[in-house]
Image (cartoon, grey):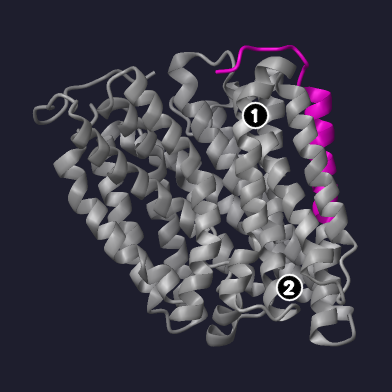
Amino acid sequence: MSTPSMTTGTRSAPPDHPARLGAVLLVIVTAYLMVGVDSTVVNVALPDIQHDLDFSRTGLSWVLNAYTLAFGGLLLLGGRVGDILGRRRTLTAGVLLFAASSLLGGLAADSAWLLAARALQGVGAALTAPSTLALITTNFPDGPRRHHALGIYSSMAGIGASVGLVLGGMLTSWASWRWALLINVPIGAAVALALPRFVTETPRHAGKFDAAGALTGTAGMTSLVYAFIRVSEAGWSDSQAMLGFSTAAALLVAFTLVESRAPQPIMPLRLFSDRNRAGGYAGVLLLPAGMFGAFYFLTLISQQVLEYSPLRAGFAFLPMTLAMFTTVRFVPRLLPRFGAKPVLLTGMALLVVAAAWLWRLEPGDGYAAGLLGPLLLMGAGVGLSFMPLNATILARIEPHEAGAASGLLQTLQWLGGTLGLSVLVTVFGTVTRHASGTPAEVLTEGSARAFGVGALIAVTALLVCALVITGRRRPAA
């Protein structure tokens, strides 16, 4: 464990005036909301991006993967940077990098330029997200005010993803897909200017950066995703794909060895020693694997098969959002009564049914017959699943490991979504290379097969959690 060291400068007392506390919360939540919105804001814009920058259907997934890979791969390292250099300083640097890379992405002239900018956005997000929660803890006095702030903060991830779909549709329809990125520039600049005025810095702690772990882990996941995307374009006999798989295996083995020996690892392997926590982490990894792919393919289907405008496509996801928020309101009451495991398995079962329903999708199915039901089930399933998973992972955790456990939870969630999307895109590419018919028929057939694999992933998540997580009840946090 690292020990606290002297903080440079004099720390002022946390502000206690309601108006200042409101300003602190607004600044911090806006920074976190930017990260959540950017995970989905380009989804609805993907067909326009594909047309303007000449992406292939399979290569288009890198617009999402470049961001989530860098974000998820560097999230734990970003938390350590905040510990050592100070949370406010790290958050300010992350927001500025995020805004600058958004400007670069909005000005992109070709696909490589855009992907590089999206990766830089992921680096900025990895510096931003871990510091926001710590700054709420240090800037709000313990008691009702902090609880209120944490409640608002906790809802921002879901709100951000939902707002991103609608906002992306609005900006793409009314202006250009480029504004889905450029809108971050003025918001990021305002947040960076407000941070030193309203937010109190946290103490610094002595420690070391686990650069080797961050490098091997991120490079290993990138190689694995590249290999899957390459297979989707060129088939399983492609030599570059096989090289990618081999490189990924070597790097991920090296990552495990580094983490087992590092004095301050970014992913403490001891967190997996508890059976329930290990099962929870497996669920957090597997659940987004099918969901990210569903968002990707449903966006393409709504615009290229149903011929929706970007704005209408964004609003098509609103039933899922409403179902999710409605369900989440009841989960805190269900957990003490039934326990985390029954609630979790119910949510996972709904996600399995939603994916299986999409598996049967046909080109002639309209929105009401083909998409509305699965979207409602997905929203309810997500609402029932993630809170019990979080409670299972953080139950009985030692206070000094709470930050590492939470950081690993976020990391696995992002990496699971990235890896899952690459697998589903591989299935899609393999099917569409040999499919015949109209473009809408080919797209629907490939997407339906991908949804089928997504259903298998959801079933795997359900079985792992059912068999690994015990049914012992725990008090809800």
Is residue 427 in view? no
Q: Pointer 2: residues within 10 angstroms few (<14), some, or many (20+)?
A: many
6 and 354: which is toward the camera: 354
292 and 350: which is toward the camera: 350
36 and 249: which is toward the camera: 36
Whether 477 is drawn above or below 415: the answer is above
Q: Which residue is mark 2?
A: 301
Q: Which residue is mark 1?
A: 331
SS majority, magenta: helix
SS at mark 2 in the image: helix
Q: Residue 320: x percent and y percent? A: 67, 53
Is residue 326 in view? yes
Segment tinted magenta in the rendering: 452-477
Amino acid residing under circle 2: Ile
Spatial CA span between label 1 and label 2: 32 Å
The quarter of the image holding the C terminus is top right
The quarter of the image holding the N terminus is top left
For residue 271, side relative to residue 112 (left or right): right
Marks 1, 2: nearer the viewer: 1
Whether 213 is drawn above or below 438: the answer is above
Q: Report the number of discs.
A: 2
SS at mark 1 in the image: helix
Asked which quadrant contains residue 403, the reply is top left
Amino acid residing under circle 1: Val
Q: Residue 373: x percent and y percent? A: 80, 55
Asked which quadrant contains residue 316, the reply is bottom right
